[in-house]
Image (cartoon, rainbow, N blue to C red):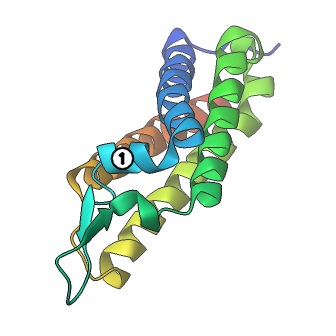
């Protein structure tokens, strides 16, 4: 018989849902302002050979940023549903844990690649987000291994 998912894993699902909801809503509803608030784009950009400045949000692609927000909201919803229902059995939770671990690993890889390919410093928020992905990768990976042993 399939054992129930531990309360620790259920808590990780809930925390993931809350973080995804916060970041996802911000990026979906106010993409430029969210990225400015995170320090990803500067508030003002000085035009070359000019005394004029324009808002840094001018350089934000709102569609791509909103798509990222929508993806984060979708993942937040999935985590919420797992916390609520699916996580009651390891058999149902395992594919989702596997997906989450792989997604977070690829996200950390994207940050590492960006460190070597972008010719500007990573903003503090970028380091915080990379750390969040790394922590979730470890939590999802450990949960995935725990689930494989339990089922």
Q: Position of residue 71 (x, y in %)?
A: 67, 44
Q: Residue at x 72, y 22 (%)?
A: 90
84 up-or-down from 126: above or below:
above
Location of the C terminus (image quadrant): top right
Q: Residue at x 48, y 15 (%)?
A: 8
Name which quarter of the figure residue 116 lies in.
bottom left
107 up-or-down from 38: above or below:
below
Q: Position of residue 31 (x, y in %)?
A: 51, 47
* Residue furthest left as drawn: 51
Residue 79 visible: yes
Question: Badge 1 is on which residue?
Answer: 129
Location of the N terminus (image quadrant): top right
Q: Is residue 103 left or right of residue 130?
A: right
Q: Residue at x 77, y 17 (%)?
A: 86
97 up-or-down from 90: above or below:
below
* Residue furthest bottom as drawn: 49
Secondary structure under tag 1 reads: helix
Q: Is residue 110 left or right of residue 126?
A: right
Name which quarter of the figure residue 70 lies in.
top right
Q: Residue at x 32, y 65 (%)?
A: 54
């Amino acid at each position: 018989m399939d054992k129930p998912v531990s309360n620790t894993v259920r808590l990780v699902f809930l925390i993931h849902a809350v973080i995804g909801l916060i970041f996802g809503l911000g990026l979906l509803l106010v993409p430029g302002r969210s990225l400015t608030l995170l320090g990803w784009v500067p508030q003002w950009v000085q035009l070359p050979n000019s005394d004029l400045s324009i808002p840094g949000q001018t350089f934000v692609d709102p569609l791509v940023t909103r798509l990222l927000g929508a993806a984060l909201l979708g993942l937040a919803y999935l985590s919420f549903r797992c916390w609520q229902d699916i996580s009651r059995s390891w058999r149902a939770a395992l594919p989702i844990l596997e997906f989450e671990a792989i997604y977070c690993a690829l996200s950390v890889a994207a940050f590492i690649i960006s460190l070597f390919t972008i010719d500007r410093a990573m903003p503090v928020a970028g380091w915080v987000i990379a750390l969040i992905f790394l922590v979730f990768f470890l939590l999802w990976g450990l949960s995935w291994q725990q689930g494989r042993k339990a089922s």
